[in-house]
Amino acid sequence: MRNFSTTHFLPGAVLLAILSGPQQASSQPAPAPVRPAPARPAVAPQPRPAAVPRPAAVPGEQPAARPVATAPRGGAACHNGMSFDRFLSELKQKAVAEGVSQRAMAEAAPYLVYDQSIVNRDRGQRVFGQVFTEFSRNRASDGAAKNAQARIRMHQAAFNLAEKEYGVPPAVIAAFWGLESSFGAELGKLHTLPSLVSLAYDCRRSEMFQKETIAALKIVDRGDLTASEMIGSWAGELGQTQFLPTHYFNYAVDYDGDGHRNLLSSAPDVIGSTANYIANGLKWRRGEPWLQEVRAPQNLASSFPWDQADLTIKLPRSKWAQLGVTFADGKPLPNDDLPASMLLPMGRTGPAFLAYANFAAYTEWNNSLIYSTTAGYLAARIAGAAPMRQPSAPVAQLPLNELKELQQLLVRAGFNVGKIDGIMGQLSRTAVKTMQIKYGLPADSWPTAELLARMRGPRAEPAAAVMPQAR
C-alpha cells in the first residue's frame, strides 16, 4: 500500500509508484503501540491452513520458489562493499537483538536469499498514464461498489464490530479491500522474505527494508504466518489489504478468535486489522466525512479563486458556500465551520470534491492523488453516494513528452519538481499553480497547453514571490 509498483492493476498496493512517482514519496507515521485486544465475540472463525502451497508460475512473474540469482560481485556500495552474506549475517544479528528467536531465524533461513530480479523490478517501474476519470471508471464502477456492498453483507458481524471498536465505516474498509486485492483474489505469487532481504541489501531504500525484513521475521516468530506462507507482491507486502510487514506486526488483530493474525485467508482478521490501522495508524476521525463531490461555479471562471483549490488550504464549508460551491446535485452546502479543502484532480473543468480531515488517511495510505481520490470516491459510492458527474467535455491532457517538457521548464524557472518523468505529483502541481498565477491563468494546478506555450516563450524567471497564500 505504499511505495511500490508494477504495470499490473493488482495487487492495488503496487500501484503507488506508477501513479505518484518518486517526487511524492512521504514518510509514514510511526505505528502506534498495539493496545491489548479487548474481549470480542467470535466472528466467523476460519480454519488456519498448514501452509500456502507454492503457486505455479504465471506470465510476467517468476514462480514462488527460492530465488537463484546471486548478489552483485564487489558488494553494495552503500554497505562499503560488504558482501550479501556478510550483510545478511549482520541483519540477522539485528533481528535477534530485537527479540526474534533462533527458532524463527532457522525457519526463515531458506528464504533469506538474494534475488536480483526483485531489485530490477524496483528500479525499472514503468509509468502509468491514466487520468483520474479513467482510473476511477475502471476501479470505482457501479459493479465495484455493488461487489463491496455484498462483501459487507457477507461479513456484517465483523464490519459492525470494527466500526464500533475503531470508528471506521464499513465502506471505507471495503473500498481499500477491493482496490488492494479484489477481496483476496489477487495477492501476488512471490515469497516475501527474498523480496524484502534483496531490497534491504540494495542501496535505494536499504534502511527501510531492513526494518521490514525484521518485522516479517517477528510475524513468523509470533506465529501468525509461517515463512512458507508468506507469499505476496514482489515488493514484500502481505495480505488482502497489502500491509507492509511493520504495519502487519503492529496493527494486525485476531478477529476470528483462532489465536493467529492471518491477513492472507481470514476475512474477519482482514477487516479488523484494516480498521485498526486506519484508526490508530492513519488517525481516522470517528463520525466525520472524508470526500464529497461538489460543483464549482464554472460560469465564474474569471473570478472564482481557483488557487484556493489545494489540499494544503482548508476553508469552512460556509466559506465555500459563499464562493458558490454546492453539492454535485445543486443542493447548498451546510452553513457550518467544518474545514474542507477543494480537490480538483483534473483541474477546474474536471470533477470537484471537498476533502475533509479524514481524506489525509487516504493520502497516507497511498500518496498517489489518483489512487487516493479513487479510494475515497469508491468508499463514498459504497456508502450510497450518487455516481460522479462526468465532465461536459473531455478534459485535455498533455501527452507524456510535453509533460516532461513542462517539468523541464519549471526546473529552469527555479522549481523543484523531483524527477522529470511526466508524472505530475504534488511538487509539479504546486509549481504549475504558481506559474498559472504569474501568467494570470486560472490557478487550478492542472498542466495545460496554454501554460506550456507561455513557458516556451522568453526564459521564465523564478516565481517564488508569487507563491499562493491561503485566504
Image (spheres, rainbow, N blue to C red):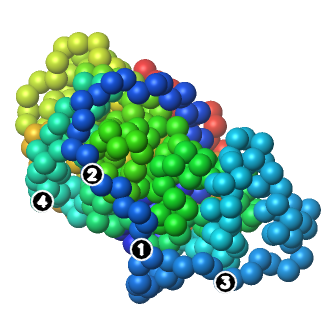
Q: Is residue 303 visible?
A: no
- Say which label, 2 or 4, has the lower sequence index: 2
- Say which label, 2 or 3, has the lower sequence index: 2
- Say which label, 4 or 1, has the lower sequence index: 1
**Residue plotted at (16% across, 50% down):** 151
Q: Residues within 10 Å of mark 2 (few under 14, many from 20)?
A: some
**C-beta proximity under 8 Å, tags 3 and 1:** no
- Say which label, 2 or 1, has the lower sequence index: 2
Q: What amino acid does circle 3 point to? A: Val
Distance (Cα) linking label 2 and label 3: 35 Å
Foreground pick, 405 / 195: 195
Q: Is residue 386 above or below residue 136?
A: above
Residue where numbered disc 1 is placed:
53
Residue where numbered disc 3 is placed:
68
Residue where numbered disc 4 is placed:
143
Q: What amino acid does circle 4 point to? A: Gly
